[in-house]
Amino acid sequence: MKSAAYIFTLFLLLSAACARNSGDPDAGMNRFLDSLISQMTLEEKVGQMTQYTSNWVVTGPTLSDNVEEELKSGRVGSIFNALTVNYVRSLQKIAVEETRMHIPLIFGFDVIHGYKTIFPLPLAEACSWDLDLIEKTAALQAKEAAAAGLNWTFNPMVDIARDPRWGRVAEGAGEDPYYGSLVAAAKVRGYQGDDLGSPQTVLACVKHFAAYGAVEAGREYNSVDMSERMLREVYLRPYHAAVDAGVGSVMTSFNDLDGIPSTANKWLMTDILRNEWGFKGFVVTDYTSMNELVNHGIAADEKEAALLAIKAGVDMDMQGADYIHNLPDLVKEGKVSGTEIDKAVYRILREKYLLGLFDDPYRYLDNQREKNTIRSKEMTDHALQSARESVVLLKNDTVGRKPVLPLSKNIKSIAVIGPLGDDQADMLGSWHGSGEAKDVVTLLQGIKEKIPETKVRYVQGCPVAENDRSGFAEALSVAKSSDIVILALGEGAWQNGEAASRSDIGLPGLQSELAESILATGKPVVAVIMAGRPLTISRLADHAPAIVNAWQLGTMAGPAIADILFGDYNPSGKLVISFPRNTGQIPVYYSMKTTGRPASGQKYTSKYLDIPNSPLYPFGYGLSYTRFTYSDLKTDKSEIGFGEPLTVSVNIKNAGDRDGVEVVQLYVRDVVASVTRPAKELKGFERIALKTGEEKTVTFTLTSDNLRFYDKDMKYVAEPGEFKVFAGRNAEDVLETGFVLK
Ligand code: BGC
């Protein structure tokens, strides 16, 4: 026998459908949700605002009895880390069939760069500058995760990061707000699709709001303090772009900002997010970040923490159980109003409604689909293409009469040396969903498959991080007796991502020493760096003739790198984050200010005594096996008025002997303004494919809208005056022209 409440829910859905048919979809949804909320007890409402993890362990799920009891009594609205159709179904069944209100759960998971098929780390894929590819990756990640019963990913992470000591640079799109905003929007579109109600899409969650990427000294969970101008012009922009793209949820960050932790920050969560930007979805805390308000020292206890969070505009409590333990009392004491609770519940239920969970709470749960979709060829094919496009060629010297790369497939013997040469687990990178090491094709396997006739030998040489030299001798002897050495160096997956800040971002352990002793043999060496952040590799850059920055590329790492090494794919990736010369140079990013004493030969100017100001490799940098020449940068007018378009054009020619892809970049500098402006700001780019000998004119349109910034009175305006325009292959190697805004 169905309960009366169940029948009532059906009745509500029916009337919502009628309202939809009458041409007003929101009216129907609102009527449904308002009626539903009016039937709920206070406890059930706060239950919807409560999320718990299922502690998925290697052998399967574990949900403590207590949580299951909570679930049955309607005191849980969402579960995360619950995987597989069967397990998700068992939980959804409890929510829908055993609770009084039959409200379906929403199931979350960190699909950061893949659910089971692991794509390159987000920082790596961002180096493709290929927004269509990035959007498709997100769509496939959604499809695979949704096939496992999930309907919510805690991604994209859109934190701008200019300090590579912070391990989570791996999860974002690098240092630039313009580019970061485009990536953020592409990922939201990819995850959510055109129809959130489709069982192929998932709800996205933009995180970590706000400015988490600017933690002091790159130390995880640390404080952030910055000007509002910097916050708005740089750090907030990608979140705003995600909201404009329709993201359905936002996660608070762990850090405080100007003294107010995000989870208690009304200015961020309500004034900016909802009132300024019009965000309609719901806000979830980061993992226990509400409870942590006590450690931050702004709440005396968890009850006060819950009060601060609800007042700030936080709707769902991840894992901390602060809301469920305290909100009912706070309402009874009159400190929180029923309306405040209803608003939060409405926002959460709205997303469940848009996901179609009220129509069919089991719509994501199809065992056959799960079997057919996960690790399907469609996934691995795209993972391979994404991995190829993520690789950045940093150096390729000419030795004799030819560049070192690409390598000939007729080579007789190759030594692959280094801790990451045949490592499956570390290729997955940090936050790799439920990806498994056994599915990864390593660099060694990729090379062997590519050139089966060649003698390929592998020696680890040393571990990733421990001080063990016992493999050095064998590594040297194999190197000496091979025609070429591929050095496979970098970080373990555990050395980037959350809680993986490093105070020295050089090659860990004895890897530099190993590299130097191999280089000393005089054999041709190609260094392949696999890491989740830029590493300080100045010495390697001085001595190794070729360096391929391969990041951590996921399931298809090996074949992708082999395609690059042997020229089956011409590298096209460009850095989205500057490579510092050493850790002391951090932060170094292309859009720094000129200062009052720009660096020069004069002593008393802004510089270091021991290194140049420029990074080792700048933003936008990446080589190709072909050669692109730039010429004829011009604007169609020397002056424009406000609102009037300016066309900038530049000629690019593929002057080399291979077809290739180039990312043409456009930068602008505001020469005189009421506040100091960056030396350059990215304003556009185009990724173009050119056949050998082919030439193309790339055009960009700028208007005064693209030139706006927060002026001395914090008004978002463009100011008249002179502007420099640069176009080129990276932030440093550019042609220059200019115009005047009248
Ligand atoms: C991380 C978030 C993540 C959450 C849930 C937190 O520790 O900071 O990025 O989404 O855990 O797994």
Image: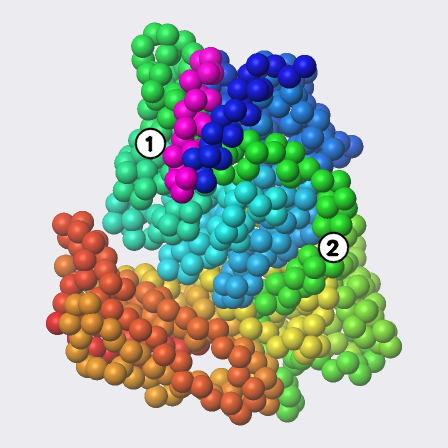
65 is within the stretch colored magenta: no
Q: Residue 451: in sight, yes or no?
A: yes
Q: Is 522 positioned to the left or the right of 245 in the image?
A: right
Q: Is 705 positioned to the left or the right of 354 in the image?
A: left
Identify the residue shown where x is 65% and y is 34%. Answer: 362
Per the rendering, the mark at residue 376 is 2
The kind of residue tagged 1 is Asn
Alpha-carbon span between mark 2 and mark 1: 43 Å
The kind of residue tagged 2 is Ser
Residue 527, located in which quarter of the rendered image? Answer: bottom right
Percent position (x, y) of residue 284?
46, 32
Looking at the picture, tell me which residue is in the foreground, 363 or 637. 363
- Residue that carries the numbered disc 1 in the rendered image: 265
Q: What stretch is highlighted in magenta?
A: 22-42
Q: Is 60 positioned to the left or the right of 679 in the image?
A: right
Q: Quadrant of the N terminus?
A: top right
Identify the residue shown where x is 64% and y is 66%. Answer: 385
Above or below, comparing residue 174 to residue 358 in the picture: below
Looking at the picture, tell me which residue is in the foreground, 43 or 333. 43
Looking at the picture, tell me which residue is in the foreground, 648 or 625. 648
Above or below, comparing residue 674 to residue 320 in the picture: below
Foreground tag (2 vs 1): 2
Q: In which quarter of the image is the C terminus?
A: bottom left
Percent position (x, y) of residue 271?
28, 36
Identify the residue shown where x is 34% and y is 22%. Answer: 340
